[in-house]
Image (cartoon, coloured by chain):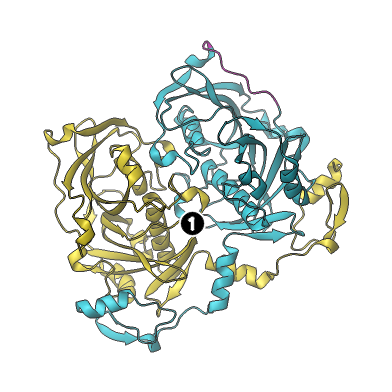
Chain colours: A yellow, B cyan
Amino acid sequence: MLNNKRRFSLMTTNSHSSSQKVGTINGTKVNEMHAVEAPLSGAADEAFVTSLRGRFVEGRFVYRQIFAIRSYEIGPDKTATMETLMNFLQETALNHVTSSGIGGDGFGATREMSLRKLIWVVTRIQVQVQRYSRWGDEIEIDTWVDAAGKNGMRRDWIIRDHYTKEIITRATSTWVIMNRETRRLSKIPGEVKKELVPFYLNRIAVASEEKDCEKLDKLTDDETSERIRSGLAPRWNDMDANQHVNNVKYIGWILETVPIEVLEDFNMTSMTLEFRRECRQSNLLESITIPTTRVIGESNNSINRKPHLQYTHMLRLQDDRIDVVRARTEWHFKQKLQ
Amino acid sequence: MLNNKRRFSLMTTNSHSSSQKVGTINGTKVNEMHAVEAPLSGAADEAFVTSLRGRFVEGRFVYRQIFAIRSYEIGPDKTATMETLMNFLQETALNHVTSSGIGGDGFGATREMSLRKLIWVVTRIQVQVQRYSRWGDEIEIDTWVDAAGKNGMRRDWIIRDHYTKEIITRATSTWVIMNRETRRLSKIPGEVKKELVPFYLNRIAVASEEKDCEKLDKLTDDETSERIRSGLAPRWNDMDANQHVNNVKYIGWILETVPIEVLEDFNMTSMTLEFRRECRQSNLLESITIPTTRVIGESNNSINRKPHLQYTHMLRLQDDRIDVVRARTEWHFKQKLQ
């Protein structure tokens, strides 16, 4: 064991710049002379770090970020979870804004929005998963924005396998602007529109006929008896930097009322979330799931890849039964590898 | 809006290789000629992807991985959470094994271990946080292993600010080997030792006098009245690839019985976890926290940076009160920025 003095000097040593590194390896003193480091120069190192957050492609209209699926981003079946995908989508969206040069001081807000105390609020998001990535897989996510009606913005994403370029996930979302103090929705001010328009790209990730535009109905009490879980309490760490429940956390609560056999034997191939109300730390939630279609067996001959199972979900405040999130999910039976 | 045919060809286009990319941007047709892409060549791209998982430094005795703190890895105070740090530590450890060439088919097991159906089990981990990183910060994590007694392995980590090289976190852990079928502890077979020894590095991340070797006492029923939460149920997504509760999930349950004011106003500066029993999906847990020291005000003049608060924690099976995890945490009052 090294003596204290030497150990401390070792621990604070920067292995890139130190010229006096000495350590004990398997009982034998060694120094830098014996070391063969991976050839990664300082400049390459900095380029790598810059690339970690992604970069613009296609003339700054598309923002692309590469991810390697990490060990803790997979579920029990060793593939990336829907939560992981949603986290990745959020990350690329925020890095897109930051890298665009129009970013303000908030979570994805532009400078002109920040000046007016305006924030983005997502009202709906739809994710279609063709294939879930496995631990160690590399994926690349493209994201871009476009106008959505007069006072909204659409943000789309395409996830590809980094090597084969196979499209493995498509997603689309709608955003509106809210005043962070009054919590009322706002029109997009002209100055904000001026910031956004140069980035607008008229391209869609989810084909019109695949887009889930159907109204998500409120579940009535009669229907809600089937699968319900009450007393879901947001934890301190479930809050985001705006002191609201992080959107991704809702997925976990929704999945709490999906039968365990479905989680084990089916892949969630589609999820549509409609955000209807903000949720704060003090709120207690109730999660409800009801099956809406069951067409097992029909899908093998179907071109449209009809789901084997479909569910409607609701997260509502336990006290006054006001709904916070409505959702629809589709599931396909897992192809088991022999 | 593009017609269907063109839209589909766009969506399946690989922007790296396509020579015929045409899109509509703000109503005007554009093609690749107008695009100015960030200068990242195919070769640089591959080097980047390889680097995502980290690399060996210091003559293959130390493994280093760089992380940029992502938007969803921070808590309400906009700094990385303890869960995030623990995830990063796990990730570097697994990538270390995979990159070493001795990896088997399991979660960090070596080839000779896999042949014998042996898996690693962590028995204790201690993390000392000097400073929590913020969203966007870049950190680098060094990890290495050494022998721990006759039948254990020690794994240490140092987290540095990537730019200043300031040490911001130190961690140490103890691992033993278990038969994955009998679930009994095993000696380290000679063949496994032969795989490991070439990587052993006699260097410690946590100084002996800082190491928390104190026994973590079982909390008695008298003590446990203060803060207790029952009915904690592991969710399907809390399971790891071995069908056990992921170690990191325990942190969330432990924090559920820490007062919210502490979570808000204090930083957790140290955490020691002792893993005593496996936990499966069907188990219901109980989380208990009791304060063990309270020395607010003394710390300003203290060289040893004594904690302002200290807690002892226990997670136990609700049915038979057998403890699964014992823990100790230390907390310092947050320095509020003016």
User: How many neighbours does mark 1 have within 10 angstroms: few (below 14), some (14-19), or many (20 or more)?
Assistant: many
Residue that extends furthest to the top in the rendered view of this protein? B222
Does the magenta segment cover residue B218? Answer: yes
Where is mark 1, residue-wise? A69
Q: Which part of the image, by quadrant, shows the N terminus of chain B?
A: bottom left
Which quadrant would residue A111 be assigned to in this image? bottom left
User: Which residue occupies the foreground of this view, B236 or B34?
Assistant: B236
Where is residue B31 shown, x and y percent of the image?
A: 34, 86
Which quadrant would residue B16 be assigned to in this image? bottom left
Stretch of the chain drawn in magenta: B214-222
Q: Is residue B214 above or below residue B45?
A: above
Where is residue A104 shown, x and y percent of the image?
A: 41, 62
Q: Is residue B49 above or below residue B239?
A: below
Where is residue A15 shown, x and y percent of the image?
A: 75, 59
- At x 62% / y 19%, what residue is drawn? B217
Q: Determine whether, in the image, residue B275 is placed left or right of residue B152.
A: left
Per the picture, the main secondary structure of the magenta-coloured stretch is loop
Q: Is residue A43 above or below residue B324?
A: below
Chain letter, disc 1 residue:
A
Q: Secondary structure at mark 1?
A: loop
- What kind of residue is marked 1? Ile
- At x 69% / y 59%, what residue is drawn? B56
User: Which residue occupies the foreground of this view, B276 or A322?
Assistant: B276
Does the magenta segment cover residue A12? Answer: no
